[in-house]
Image (cartoon, rainbow, N blue to C red):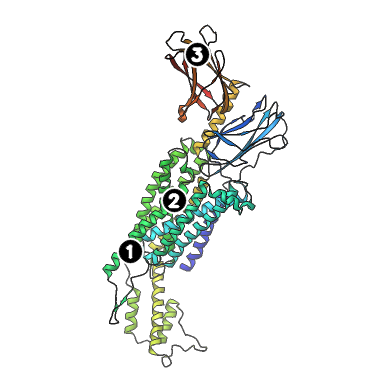
Amino acid sequence: MTQTIAPRVRTLVLLLLAAACALLAGAGPASAHAAVTGSDPGQGAVVDKAPARITLTFSEQVALSDDSLRVLDPEGKRVDTAEPANVSGTTYAVPLHSGLPDGTYTVAYQVVSADSHPVAGAYTFSIGAPSKTSVSVSGQSTDDGVVGWLYGFGRYVSYAGFIVMAGGAAFVLACWRRGSGVRPVQRFVVSGWVALTASTLALLLLRGSFTGSGKVSDIFDLSLLGQVLQTKSGAALVSRLLLLAAAALFIAVLFGAYARPSPTTTLTDGSLRQPDPREDAEEKRDLTFGLSIGGVVVAAGLAASWAMSEHASVGLQAGIAMPVDVLHLLAVAAWLGGLGALLVALYRAPADTPVDAPAVRRFSQVAFGSVLALIATGTYQSWRQLGSWSAFTDTRYGQLLLAKIALVVVLVGVAWISRRWTGRLAETVPVEAPAVREKERVGAGAETARDVDIAAVRDEEVPVEGEGEGEGGSGLDTDEQPDSERAAQLARQQAARDAARQKRMRDADPNRFGLRRSVLAEAGIAVVLLAVTTVLTQTEPGRTEQEAKAATSAAASSSADTGASGALTLNMPFDTGGEDGKGIVTIDVDPARVGGNEMHVYVERPNGRAFDIPEVKVEFTLKAKDIGPLPVVPDHIATGHWSANGVQIPMAGDWQVDVTVRTSDIDEVTVSKNAQIG
């Protein structure tokens, strides 16, 4: 039965891995995690005169390089004059040559968002009138191509390696301590450490090319590697490597001193002293406690290396999101990694050390607690990254999240089936040890050594040493063999028969066989689930995607409503209560969109005549996004006229414009009005 099952298991696992890799490869380029929410000039805009600079506003802060913002003329030549710089908040600008001729210009950007993902794109605007351009704006993302695919695959392997290493070790310590001496389980955990270490080194080398040119030749560029080490992502990867050194020490103790029994000691008289079971148990408990504490600390540190450099580290409630992200990843490792270790134990554990029902039952409890933790942390993460119910279906992140939830539901259903098989396995009555029965039968019989060997071959199909007609084939001849050699050979044959019979009886147990199949199904679903999760971590959060869409839509709507000039005019009567304190303040904002704007303030008496006042101040507040107030102090130009250039509106929305008017040393008032800007 085992010979039939094992090839099927290998085939199924290979198919599932292939499906997971296909899902990862077919997911397409990952979307950016910082979106462009505004630009000046805007996309497709036609301006009368050449702008002095180009500004871009993102949904979060980004990292710039020398070529992050490039402006190309219709012939493809660069017309920007200096490195891009941050002008305010999340707005970045690059100056242009003066006196640019009419035509269509291309703005290309390639930056790195605060959560470590590359952001690339391009758009066009025109001076005077649109013209033909030789610049292609497609295919700007570095996520396309070999480097992007390798980076995504490296992330998948790193997640899988962490889950296998941390979850497998947790399974041994919390559920099946005898497993620390089982070679297949040891190889399983060590393979996770190797995979995580190798993938981390690969990501460190790929990072520079991934966030830059996307060229394979830049992977081993040491100058790029030096730049990566100075970034948040580079620091996280280096920290992960240091923690993996501590993890190697933990694994060495777990499968070394922890797995070995207490040694015997030689007394002064030459006799051997066997270890005291009570002292051995106490020492084992202390070592288990120490390994548990150390393992949790190392695993939490490794999980934090993801949380500190990705989604959780930026945006809403980052201080809460990072610990939640660490807990989420630890719960995934305890569940899925423990599941993999259980699968290895069920299929590969030796006959004399089978995984028992209590161990499976303990893992079932650990898995149940992990699922509860995943539900709690996953709910918070979903709310944080989506922000609305519509984002589930209207954004790519939401659609992937729905697929992940469906897979988790299926996985929990299969786990419930495994739990039922575990209950049945625990109720199975133990069978009398075949070794005892065999010894009694051998002791009572009068078979010769050759008769015993032939019976063993026929019954268990175990090869008999020294049997054959050729040279040395008469090794069982009692006249030619010493009694000690014959006894040792019989003992080996007896052990082989016992092991073979025990393995056959174990595999024939229908409850154990059912548990093995259900756990194998769980592992297959887990492989696909991990692939979806990896793609999800590289996808733009639904909240950011919807905000970017809203900003673009609002900008287009504003442009259509205000005409070519796009100017916004607000008239607000005021009364400071003092002498000559009544009048009308007029605010003109041009072009009233995201990015840089020109603002003019006019103060008139009720009869329409302009007059000066000691002070006028303006503030912009977007309450829906908790932005502002953004103060603007205009310069006095002429009687009743103040002006300010480069007024930055970072995001489209319903802005509240507050104007403070002071007509004397003690008389002032603030008037407000809402307006759609952007």
Q: Quadrant of the C terminus?
A: top right
Local packing at callout 2 (Cα closer than 10 Å; few below 14, some 14-19, many 20+) is many
Q: Amino acid at mark 2?
A: Ala
Q: Relative to the observer, which residue lies in front, 475 or 447?
A: 475
* Side of 131 where 235 appears, left or right: left
Q: Position of residue 185 (x, y in %)?
A: 43, 64
Residue at coordinates 48% horizontally, 50% vertically from top-left?
529
Badge 2 or badge 3: first in the primary sequence: 2
Q: Amino acid at mark 3?
A: Ile
* Side of 359 where 471 appears, left or right: right
Local packing at callout 3 (Cα closer than 10 Å; few below 14, some 14-19, many 20+) is some
Q: Position of residue 318 (x, y in %)?
A: 44, 40
What is the total number of numbered labels drawn onto the structure image? 3
- Residue under label 3: 613
Q: Amino acid at mark 1?
A: Thr
- Residue under label 2: 303
- Residue under label 1: 428
